[in-house]
Amino acid sequence: MSVWNAAWRERALPELAAREWDLIIIGGGISGAGILREAARRGWKCLLLEQRDFAWGTSSRSSKMVHGGLRYIAKGQFGLTRDSVRERQRLLAEAPGLVDPLSFIMAHYRATFPGPKVFGGVLSLYDALAGKRNHLFHSLQQLRYLAPGLKEDGLLGGTRFFDAVTDDARLVMRVLGEARGDGGEALNGIEVVELLREEGRVVGLLGEDRESGQRLRFRARAVAQATGAWAGRFRQDDDVRIRPLRGSHLLLPAWRLPVAHAFSFLHEQDRRPVFVFPWEGATVVGTTDLDHAESLDREARISVDEADYLLAACAQQFPGARIAAADVLSTWAGVRPVVCAAGSTLKPSDEKREHLLWVEPGCVTLAGGKLTTFRLLALEVLRACTGFVGRELDDRGAAVFRQQPAQPMPSLSPARQRRLAGRHGRELQGVLALLDEVGPERVGATDTLWAELAWAAQNELVLHLDDLLLRRTRLGLLLANGAEAELPRIRSLCQARLGWSDERWLREVRDYLQLWQSCYRLPRE
């Protein structure tokens, strides 16, 4: 694949705008990346445009879980659950090191719902949809060994089952890498101003380069909108609307709340499911679920009430840990694009997580959807586009991620080799070349290698410092104060690779730290 950085972007932009495309995808989250990947593998001339950065919206701010949606069984969404568990198993098989198994424990308390029998029955159906038994009940004595520090008042035992966990932003980058390897193109920093129509049909779009202010026209046989919570921006429907729901999370140092499993429990305040789980060497507490009333063009941020709610969840389930606001390493908030009926009065958590396609001549809009089922959603969108593009769509169930030959990595443990291969796929050879140059050292206490940071800076289309520290890597979440203490070394390693002047670097640091303080730290009263 060709080099993929800001210098390439500047050179390529006019030429890409001049091409005639089969399909242009708007939106660089997991849904858009999935559509690009499935179109590119079939030889479609396809381009993805993202207004901010890849995975900038919901796809870098999710709960990081690749799961079958156990809660959807209770809502009667059996088809969604079946599809999700099967796609979960595909991703576990295709992308080890990026999508990994995670054990969950639901603790059962006297006179509270759900009890072991009811929950076990639901899990039996869940397992049947997945095609394998995946759960086991543990007695109180066994649970004390598995989950030290868990609240014991009235505790009967716990049920253990398995789902999966990922780094959602890296999942997007890996899918984009597969698409680019098959001929697809992707650009960030291109905001769609309007759809272009001729004789009642969408024939392309007018985009604005947010870096230069230049406006360009892109023409295509079909346009697919996969913009998440922004899905209604160029489309209005009197009967259906997108209800933006915010989910916020706390990230704690692992030593303050060490957990080896994900713990699922109902919050005492509203009986909503809440999770505490290990992720990237830290501990996540989440999530909330409430209407998001702020502008979608501003970065979502946790509120004081949400932070208090999640801290209360820690106190409820792990009272001995005495987690306080001072323990919080960072926060993040994402906006879920939930499709609902116009005028819906349901509580946010009661809305179904279904998706919807709107089709008009030359344009297909995807609204809603789930991280786990991105491949199925992509195929559904492409089927709706075939008539506009003039191509047939065959689906033989080919893997999303092409298997790569094993690469020798003698300086790394087997676990780190697996992680590196899972996160970089086709680009692994390039990362290993930088590993020889930079060395195998990790950044602080994280699992991220300095070589990965260098690779991202010169090969993963980083336009701004927050792209590098919040999405290409997660250092801004995992290190204190957004990795501020590491910025001098990051500068020495990455500034030249990014092609930034001293003035540009200082400006990027200022903007990044302001953003982190505003949107990724615990809010103050």
Image (spheres, rainbow, N blue to C red):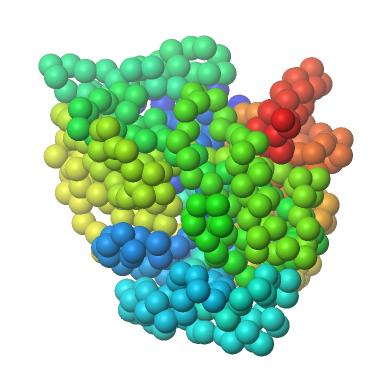
Q: Position of residue 231 (x, y in %)?
A: 34, 32
Q: Residue at x 42, y 81 (%)?
A: 117
Residue 363 lies, with reference to residue 14, above or below; the image says below
Left or right, residue 4 beside residue 346: right
Look at the image and tell me whether residue 179 can be seen.
no
Question: Is residue 284 left or right of 253 when viewed as pictured?
Answer: left
| 140 up-or-down from 358: above or below | below
Query: Which residue is nearer to you in this view: 164 or 444?
Result: 164
Q: Is residue 52 above or below residue 285?
A: above
Q: x, y (%) of residue 518?
A: 69, 28
- Closer-to-camera residue (258/151): 151
Q: Position of residue 469 (x, y in %)?
A: 69, 40
Q: Residue at x 35, y 60 (%)?
A: 72
Q: Is residue 470 above or below residue 26?
A: below
Q: Is residue 276 visible?
A: yes
Q: Quadrant of residue 515 in the image?
A: top right
Please identify the quadrant where the C terminus is shown. top right
Residue 180 lies, in percent from the top left, at: 45, 45
